[in-house]
Image (cartoon, rainbow, N blue to C red):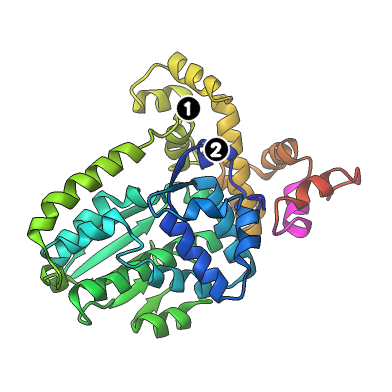
Amino acid sequence: MALESLNIPDWLLGASDDHTVAATMVATLLAVMETAGNDSATLLKKAGIDASELQNADNRISYRAYLRLCCAAIDHHPVAEVCLPLGEQLNISALGTLGLGLLSCKTCREAFQLALKYRSTLGVPTTISLETESDRELLVVDEPFKPLLSAKHIRALFYSVISCVFHNGRYLVGGAFRFEKICLNLETAEDNKVLADYFGCEVISNAGRNCVAFNKALMNAPIQYASPSAKKITDPLCQELSSRLHRQSSIAQQVAKLLLKRLHNPPNLSEVAGKLDISSRSLSRQLLNEGLSFQLLLDELRKTNAKLLLREHRLTMEAVAHAVGFSDVANFRRAFKKWTNITPAYYRNHCHPHERQIPHCATKGRARP
């Protein structure tokens, strides 16, 4: 299976030979899919994963292959049906070295700090942070490339993370660990009741960000299985694994993060180079080495975000144009047609939801609205 449903630039996925995702993550997702009635051999074939790669828990799978498996899962099943059980099954043993590290911690706070520090050992990139708000602690789940991702994929990521945190929290400190509130930075509320029933707490849509809140006092709760002596062993193991798996973000990814922060009024080449502490000439040269130019990268981000806005949001054409940095609809329409060979109106009305339909639409040679 290709990654059409992600609809994100190829360079964002990283190197095709970059094996960073823990095999236990893949095996766990596969087990959840089998429970939902899917054939594992078929799923592995679609994802391009050899079954032998999963036989050793220490093995690593490419991020692209893992994403193909994720796409197969949420393209054919409701997100909550897959991702809540996935988080539940990502228990201490499935977390590998990180799981052993969590067991060695004294308190819930220490476990959270360790998990956030070494989450890269699982190989699935995302941004997770802890914030204190009055008497509550907030676990915030974000994605630096969120403007390029569909609501479905953002929900899948968020549900998996909070389910994993919830079930492992209850295992480590007992039944006292619970969420008080879940906030969704999404327009729809289609899963609110499912989440409320599953986690037993309030669920709020249209929040400013995706996060869960729990009582701050829980952070001092003791870990039931704490082993200070084991911590002397697990900390260096986590550090070594994290260092070995670390991959410097490509220059395109670094530039994209800066551009996406203000795509409606993007910084120019000189500004971006300054923020990266390199010269404009050096930035251009490094992008060229990755097969890109600054303008090509900006156009790709604008195109991808525009498609997402046209598919998933009830925005006027003027609002979409402004969001991706065009002062008027006419200029946006010309740019969009240059990128895709079709107009934004035709894309919104006829090419939703899969990117693979666009080449078919664009090659008919008919007049476009």
Residue 263 part of the magenta segment: no
Which residue corresponds to the image point at 57% horizontal and 26% vertical from the top-left?
A: 292
Query: In this rendering, would 253 be left or right of 343?
Result: left
* Residue farthest along the left direction in this orientation: 229
119 or 341: nearer the viewer: 119
Name the residue: 72% across, 58% down. 352
- Residue at image point 52% right, 64% down: 30
Q: Label 1 neighbourhood size at 10 Å, few (<14), some (14-19), many (20+)?
A: few
Q: Of the numbered discs in the image, which one, if any, rests on residue 16?
A: 2
**Which type of secondary structure does the marked residue at label 1 adopt?**
loop
Checking the image for residue 268, the label placed there is 1
Q: Amino acid at mark 1?
A: Asn
Q: Of marks 2 and 1, which one's residue comes earlier in the chain?
A: 2
Per the model, the C-alpha gap separating discs 2 and 1 is 30 Å
Residue 126 x/y as whole percent? 39, 51
Front in this rendered view, residue 250 or 49: 49
Left or right: where 165 falls relative to 33: left
Residue 267, position as x, y percentages in the image: 45, 31
Region in magenta: 343-353
Classify 275 as above or below 42: above
